Image (cartoon, rainbow, N blue to C red):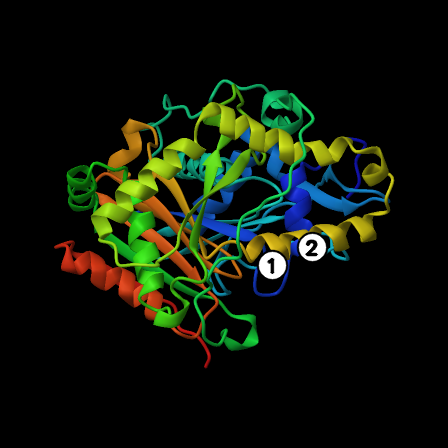
């Protein structure tokens, strides 16, 4: 299980490794739903073919004296029918294991990945490679000429792009206020509840365009109001509702890495007086656009990466670093009410689009977390919640229904 081929993990992965828990496993799931039931034997072969294209997944994370590191492993993936929880625990320092898992159920192919390996963009690329190989095996000769590759070299795919594009030493403390967190008891036994919300992409886009905002800003504002409606009136002016939004840095830098390469930006609003959804969406959109300027994105990345180059920090043993990172992560989490991650329009090779029904996904979290996937006219939100109280999700869905959006909602069962 050992190899001389090893490399250091990136700074985002260090946060995930320090803050992993039984509830928040720091894993995410991306799924592709086909139009016919999955053949397990073909899927197993497809995964074995896919790892030839993405050997970056065939690794094991190990503990060093000062930092964790990644090395190649000869552990082979084994496909199984989905039986366990969504976003399972995929890292154990005492156990030799892969940090991803492929399962199936009915027409659905699931890829669960430990977030220390890659982000949603990298996970979706890996999933689409698996799906393409599966369809080639299922329909011999039909898709032989179809390819799915960015043209990136093995070195490009393995690149730590945070380090590659780091420019200036910059270290500043966040002055953001602690945010309001939806109240209530957390689910017992370290559970998360998952909601899958489907709607027409055309309906949602029509509303957001009428407001003059992006789809992300429309949903961000709708979630803010859903949280506000759950807040006791006396608290509405005391703490802001803050939505954190992951940003794919590949849009700002010439990177093809299959590893993590994202930052988070925050949008906040304090509900000191009533505000309409349209006005809040316009405000959200303006704030988000200012946060997404190249200057802001680069400054944030440099600030985050600077800690890697502070000599006293580099010499501190791993267990102390993890305590510090864990504490900082908890303080950061207090400044966020929920996370909203828009994975965008899914564009598999056009030759295989008709074999695919839709995409969706989830992420483990200690707070509310919503993903957004769009495929053709199906827009899906995957919501993860640690709370027993489902009021915020109900408020969000009712708000969309009141706007005339047709909604379908599915939810996992939990033990009360």
Whether pointer 2 and pointer 1 mark residues with C-beta atoms closer than 8 Å, the reply is no
Q: Which mark is residue 326?
A: 2
The residue closer to the viewer here, 170 or 152, is 170
Q: Is residue 313 left or right of residue 189?
A: right
Quadrant for the C terminus, please: bottom left
Image location (x, y in percent) of residue 70: 73, 39
Determine whether 121 is above or below 42 in the image.
Answer: above
Q: Give the residue number, with chain letter if any, for mark 1.
A: 89
Q: Quadrant of residue 106?
A: bottom left
Label 2: which secondary element = helix
Quadrant for the N terminus, please: top right
Name the residue rendered at 45%, 38% in the picture.
Answer: 124
Q: Is residue 97 visible?
A: no
Q: Which mark is residue 120?
A: none
User: Mark 2 or mark 1, which has the lower sequence index?
Assistant: 1
Name the residue rendered at 84%, 33% in the picture.
Answer: 311
């Amino acid at each position: 299980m050992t190899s001389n081929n090893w490399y250091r993990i990136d700074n985002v992965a260090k946060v995930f490794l320090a803050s992993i828990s039984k509830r928040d496993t720091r894993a995410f799931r991306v799924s592709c739903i086909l139009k016919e039931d999955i053949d397990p034997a073909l899927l197993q072969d497809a995964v074995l073919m896919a790892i030839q294209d993405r050997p970056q997944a065939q690794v094991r994370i190990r503990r060093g004296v000062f930092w964790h590191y990644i090395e190649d492993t000869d552990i082979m993936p084994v496909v199984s029918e989905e039986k366990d929880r969504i976003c399972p625990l995929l890292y154990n320092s005492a156990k030799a294991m892969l940090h991803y898992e492929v399962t199936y159920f009915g027409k659905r192919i699931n890829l669960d990945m430990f977030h220390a390996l890659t982000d949603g963009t990298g996970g979706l690329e890996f999933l689409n490679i698996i799906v393409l190989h599966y369809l080639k095996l299922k329909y011999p000769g039909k898709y032989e000429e179809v390819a799915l590759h960015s043209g990136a070299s093995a070195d490009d795919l393995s690149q730590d792009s945070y380090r590659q594009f780091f420019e200036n030493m910059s270290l500043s403390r966040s002055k953001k206020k602690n945010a309001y967190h939806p109240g209530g008891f957390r689910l017992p036994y370290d559970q998360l509840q998952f909601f899958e919300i489907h709607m027409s992409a055309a309906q949602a886009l029509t509303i957001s365009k009428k407001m003059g905002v992006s789809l992300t800003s429309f949903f961000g504002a709708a979630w803010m109001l859903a949280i506000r409606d759950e807040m006791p009136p006396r608290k509405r002016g005391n703490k802001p509702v803050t939505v954190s939004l992951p940003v794919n840095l590949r849009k700002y830098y010439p990177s093809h890495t299959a590893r993590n390469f994202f930052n988070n930006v925050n949008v906040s609003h304090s509900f000191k007086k009533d505000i309409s959804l349209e006005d809040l969406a316009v405000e959200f959109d303006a704030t988000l656009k200012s946060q997404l300027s190249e200057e802001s994105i680069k400054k944030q990345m440099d600030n985050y990466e600077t800690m890697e180059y502070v000599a006293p920090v580099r010499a501190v043993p791993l267990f102390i670093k993890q305590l510090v990172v864990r504490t900082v992560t908890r303080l950061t989490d207090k400044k966020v009410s929920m996370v909203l991650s828009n994975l965008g329009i899914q564009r598999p090779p056009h030759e295989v689009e008709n074999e695919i029904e839709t995409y969706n996904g989830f992420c483990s979290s200690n707070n509310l977390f919503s993903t957004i996937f769009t495929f053709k006219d199906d827009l899906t939100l995957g919501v993860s919640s640690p709370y027993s109280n489902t009021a915020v999700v109900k408020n969000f869905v009712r708000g969309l229904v009141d706007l005339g959006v047709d909604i379908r909602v599915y939810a996992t069962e939990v033990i009360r």
